[in-house]
Image (cartoon, rainbow, N blue to C red):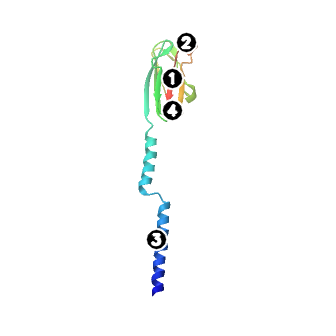
Amino acid sequence: MKNNTVFVLLLLIVLGGGYFLMSKSKPAPEIAAKVEKKVETEKSSATDKTFEVKGLNFAFDIKEIKVKLNDKVKINFTNTEGMHDFRIDELGAKTNIIKTGETDSLEFVASKVGTFEYYCSVGQHRTNGMWGKLIVE
């Protein structure tokens, strides 16, 4: 009888220890929820940003645009004078060359952190000051 009691007691200790070790290998539900919430927050932090930019005579009316990494960016470019376009080489974004009174749009994801120059590629417009900065934070 005494042997059986010791055996049962040892068996309970071994099983209890095994259960304890097994339960440590799985993340607690509250930790798993925090990890999922963090991933969800990172995905939802990207937002749609729309900017209205005008092309003037050798200038853009906005000299600096700031967005966050992974933002979806839309630029509605309106030409008020002459012939112009809007380009950001590093992000592969550009409009067509448009005439006075015309509008063209471009969309891209701000997929790289940094400062990128946007500019007009027509003639010497860029050299004459038709450029600005896109800052991706």
Q: Position of residue 67 (x, y in %)?
A: 46, 30
Dot 2 lies on which element?
loop
> Which numbered disc flags the more N-terminal residue, 1 or 3?
3
Alpha-carbon span between mark 2 and mark 3: 78 Å
Dot 3 lies on which element?
helix
Alpha-carbon span between mark 1 and mark 2: 15 Å
Alpha-carbon span between mark 3 and mark 4: 53 Å
Q: Residue at x 48, y 61 (%)?
A: 24
Residue 133, label in figure: 1
- For label 3, count other residues whose C-alpha is less than 10 Å away and answer few (under 14), some (14-19) or many (20+): few
Q: Where does label 3 land, which residue?
A: 16
- In which quadrant of the rendered view does residue 44 lie? top left
- In which quadrant of the rendered view does residue 9 lie? bottom left
Q: Where does label 4 land, which residue?
A: 110
- For label 1, count other residues whose C-alpha is less than 10 Å away and answer few (under 14), some (14-19) or many (20+): some
> Which numbered disc flags the more N-terminal residue, 2 or 4?
4
Alpha-carbon span between mark 1 and mark 4: 13 Å
